[in-house]
Amino acid sequence: MTEQQAAERETESPDVPEEAAMAPDDAEPEDAEDQDEPALDPAAAARRAAALAYVRKFGDPVLRTRARPVERFDEALKDEIERMGELMIDAIGVGLAATQIGVLHRVLVYRVQQDSPVVALVNPEIEWKGGEEEIMEEGCLSLPSVLVDVERPLHVRVRARDERGEEIVIEASGLEARVIQHEVDHLEGVLILDRTSREQRKEAMRALREAQEAA
Ligand code: ZN
């Protein structure tokens, strides 16, 4: 998931300008970002481009594949989680599922607030969802140039393991709950395109086709 919605929540403006929403990843930063966000410096932009190159994009069948539970909590898993956290931060995302880097493990990382530690969830299960739902615009590192409205429960409780295999339970609300649900969807092969209106899906598919043709 991308950081755009985190910024949007801060400003509480529900409308993203069309040009910001549809700008491709390689556009000038001042075009691609909200105007109240500082432009990326060249080093950060280069890191972002390098990280995004590792992220599987729409059309890659791995994104439609269900990930397998992790059974071994070893050094390799720790390395995988550390690498995912670095990629997510470099890509300026707020969440990343292992599926998105082509690893079919039920692992996700997220960080909804800058400077807070990256949270890693292994074998996450959403065991409770509150009845209250909210519609918010979501982006995805695997779907460059796409932002669509997605309705999701506002509160969830998720049970998972940490990187050492210890059980953890997280009660999340708002953006944190949304990011967790978005990344758990990835582990099931589900994308935001599956969770939006038919109209927005059609528009998103057109934007993806145009971006792919331009590349
Ligand atoms: Zn995503």
Image (cartoon, rainbow, N blue to C red):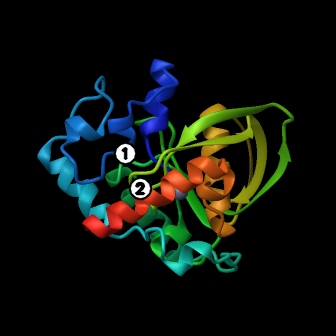
Q: CA distance from mark 2 to mark 1?
A: 7 Å
Circle 2 residue = 207
Circle 1 residue = 22
Provide the secondary structure element on which disc 2 rests.
helix
Question: CB under 8 Å between callouts 2 and 1?
Answer: yes
For residue 138, side relative to residue 210 (left or right): right
User: Which of 84/142 is in front?
Assistant: 142
Give above or below for 26 relative to 101: above
Q: Is residue 25 visible?
A: yes
Query: Where is residue 212, by image quadrant?
Result: bottom left
Query: Where is residue 47, by image quadrant?
Result: bottom left
Query: Around disc 1, counting alpha carbons within 10 Å, would you say few (fewer than 14), some (14 to 19), or many (20 or more)?
Result: some
Give the quarter of the figure containing the C terminus: bottom left
Amino acid type, label 2: Ala
Query: Residue at left 23%, top 54%?
Result: 26
Give above or below for 186 relative to 15: below
